[in-house]
């Protein structure tokens, strides 16, 4: 009998080792801690870096005289966490998701407004994360943010945030990352980063394309880029613009921006018109700035819609509207039809872009973008927006 038990024990140890769990057989209902080395990379989330850290992975082993049952106990830190970093007069959001892999805990982070390099929507290169039991600490080195805290309830982490020479109390609350808020088919809210394609061309007005670009960059949750038929320099108001992408290699666009300027020649460039129609059909939203609306009208894309443009082009747009069966409205900074949004002259592209940020990501994110730009944004109806995607 002793010989049989001895060999049974050896078999259990070998089986456990083969599974990679390395659990030690002790008394029933005991919890064991195992330290493992984690090196991981998440390529699907913005502001996420390669991480090398040590974490604790816990297992609970139970056994009878006939068998041992090995059970993995999920870490209480697993989940999606959101906090608001205090900035005296306002806050900046920080979110992170902790997942439990076979080799340990991993975390991905999203933070807004603390560092201009985050505007480029590129992964941070220097994030450090560690967790042990109910304790957690991380350093977002690019933004200079350091946090150390403890799980105080099942859904709340409390700790100390160290940023720009001040230490402050900060709390993170657990959220449902899968929850999506939708008001209707056209006014939806998403948590994903959205691609914004901004057309440039010879004669493009600088603020028509740069204003929306500034807004989406300061919102931190959009990937905005310029695009043209070719990767070459285009001239606009005395400035040279080299687009980031051509029609052939650009990422799929969620939002398409058509700026104004010297637009007449565009309507005789069939490749560009075809690209606008195809991209608009696939994207969720198309926005024109200033007389960029004339490109949409000349492409027969405004049937039955309400539109606006720069005051100097209102009479022309009104005549076009009468011929094509849409409506031209004088006065508003922008007119939102859901799929198609048109804005008035030049700087109104900023208002239209801020409206889209508020509509898609929440009023709080749009206010943050306007504040970062020191732009006096005065939306007429804030009641149409959710305050934040975390509500």
Image (cartoon, helix red, strand yellow):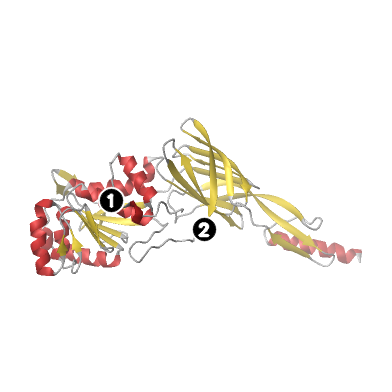
Precedes in sequence: disc 1 or disc 2: 2
Asked whether, in this view, residue 250 is left or right of residue 66, the answer is left
Asked whether, in this view, residue 69 is left or right of residue 198, the answer is right
Cα–Cα gap, marks 1 and 2: 31 Å
Mark number, residue 62: none
Q: Secondary structure at mark 1?
A: loop
Mark number, residue 176: 2
Provide the residue designation for mark 1.
Answer: 380
Q: How would you rate the neighbour count of disc 2 (Cα within 10 Å): few for under 14, some for 14-19, many for 20 or more?
A: few
Residue in front for this viewpoint, 47 or 96: 96
| 141 shown above or below 279 | above
Asked whether, in this view, residue 328 is left or right of residue 98, the answer is left
Q: How would you rate the neighbour count of disc 1 (Cα within 10 Å): few for under 14, some for 14-19, many for 20 or more?
A: few
Picture coordinates of residue 78, whole percent (x, y): 58, 54
Q: Residue at x 11, y 56 (%)?
A: 314
- Res. 241 in view: no
């Amino acid at each position: 009998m002793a010989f049989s038990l001895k060999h049974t024990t050896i078999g259990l140890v070998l089986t456990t080792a083969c599974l990679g769990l390395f659990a030690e057989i002790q008394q029933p209902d005991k919890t064991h801690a195992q330290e493992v080395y984690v090196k991981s990379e998440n390529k699907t989330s913005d502001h996420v870096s390669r991480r090398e850290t040590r974490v604790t992975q816990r297992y609970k082993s139970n056994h009878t005289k006939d068998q041992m049952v090995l059970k993995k106990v999920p870490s209480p830190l697993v989940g999606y966490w959101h906090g608001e970093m205090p900035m005296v007069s306002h806050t900046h959001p920080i979110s992170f998701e902790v997942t439990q892999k076979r080799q340990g805990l991993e975390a991905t982070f999203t933070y807004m407004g603390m560092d201009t390099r985050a505007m480029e929507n590129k992964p941070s290169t220097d994030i450090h994360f560690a967790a042990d039991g109910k304790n957690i600490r991380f350093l977002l080195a690019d933004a200079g943010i350091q946090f150390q805290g403890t799980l105080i309830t099942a859904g709340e982490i409390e700790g100390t945030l160290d940023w720009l020479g001040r230490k402050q109390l900060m709390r993170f609350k657990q959220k449902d990352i899968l929850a999506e808020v939708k008001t209707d088919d056209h006014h939806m809210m998403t948590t994903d980063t959205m691609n914004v394609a901004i057309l440039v061309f010879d004669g493009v007005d600088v603020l028509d394309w740069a204003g929306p670009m500034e807004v989406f960059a300061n919102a931190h949750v959009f990937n905005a880029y310029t695009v043209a038929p070719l990767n070459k320099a285009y001239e606009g108001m005395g400035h040279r613009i080299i687009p980031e992408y051509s029609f052939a290699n650009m990422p799929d666009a969620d939002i398409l921006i058509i700026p104004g300027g010297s637009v007449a020649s565009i309507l005789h460039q069939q490749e560009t018109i075809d690209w606008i129609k195809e991209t608009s059909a696939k994207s969720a939203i198309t926005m024109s700035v200033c007389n960029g609306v004339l490109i949409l009208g000349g492409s027969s894309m405004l049937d039955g819609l309400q539109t606006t443009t720069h005051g100097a082009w209102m009479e022309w747009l009104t005549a076009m509207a009468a011929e094509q069966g849409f409506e031209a409205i004088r006065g508003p900074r922008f007119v939102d039809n859901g799929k198609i949004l048109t804005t008035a002259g030049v700087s109104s592209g900023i208002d239209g872009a801020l409206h889209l940020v508020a509509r898609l990501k929440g009023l709080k994110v749009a206010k943050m973008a306007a504040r970062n730009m020191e732009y006096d944004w005065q939306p007429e109806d804030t009641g149409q927006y959710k305050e934040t995607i975390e509500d």
